[in-house]
Amino acid sequence: MSAQVAVVVGNPKPASRTLAAATYVARELTGVEPTLTVDLATLGAAILDWADPSIASLVASVGAADLVVVASPTYKGTYTGLLKLFLDRFAGGTGLRGLAVPMLLGAAPHHALAAELTLRPVLTEIGATVPGRGLFVIDKQHDDPAAYTDWLAATRPAVAAFLQTRSSGQEAT
């Protein structure tokens, strides 16, 4: 069984730096391209329609993924309302069943704890396991591999162990 890897990006601008950074992180953690990319900016008004079957399908697919990189630009010290609209679709405690990486891009280091303080608690509340600390990247460094090196070194072993356990059919502890 190959890992199901999803990227969810809450930047209101489609094809953003946030999307590029999140895709990079997913690829670096797993060695493969994500199997699902959800660029929320491309969904339009459908994200507001709780009866929309295409959004329900995306929620189900993201929820079933083994690893989800959930990324947003930092906005007012937290993640965007667009990402909040999507995450509200997940049932508390059971919506995400794999690992989730909270990731924020921001203009200044004084928001470095925002991924830990604002996004991580929401991801755990909706069922995800977070394998390490949240990732914060200065947006001007989004395309510099050095901006991710230390975080990847600390997080990659936990992700690999979880995915290996999952692929062998065992329950992760």
Image: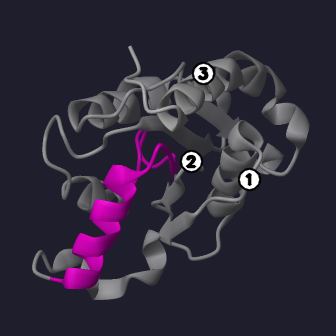
Q: Residue at x 54, y 20 (%)?
A: 133
The label shown at residue 161 is 3
Crowd tier of the residue under label 2, counting other residues whose Cα lies within 10 Å: few below 14, some 14–19, many 20 or above: some
Q: Quadrant of the C terminus?
A: top left
Q: Residue at x 50, y 63 (%)?
A: 11
Residue 36, above or below 51: above
The span shown in magenta is 52-80
Crowd tier of the residue under label 1, counting other residues whose Cα lies within 10 Å: few below 14, some 14–19, many 20 or above: some
- Tell me which numbered mark, 1 or 2, is placed earlier along the sequence: 2
* Left or right side of 48 for 108: right
Between 168 and 26, the one lying in front of the other is 168
Q: Nearer the viewer, mark 1 or mark 2?
A: 2
Q: Amino acid at mark 2?
A: Ala
- Contact, mark 1 vs mark 2 (Cβ under 8 Å): yes
Q: Give SS at disc 1.
A: loop
Crowd tier of the residue under label 3, counting other residues whose Cα lies within 10 Å: few below 14, some 14–19, many 20 or above: few
Distance, label 3 to label 1, CA atoms, is: 16 Å
The label shown at residue 129 is none
The label shown at residue 3 is 2
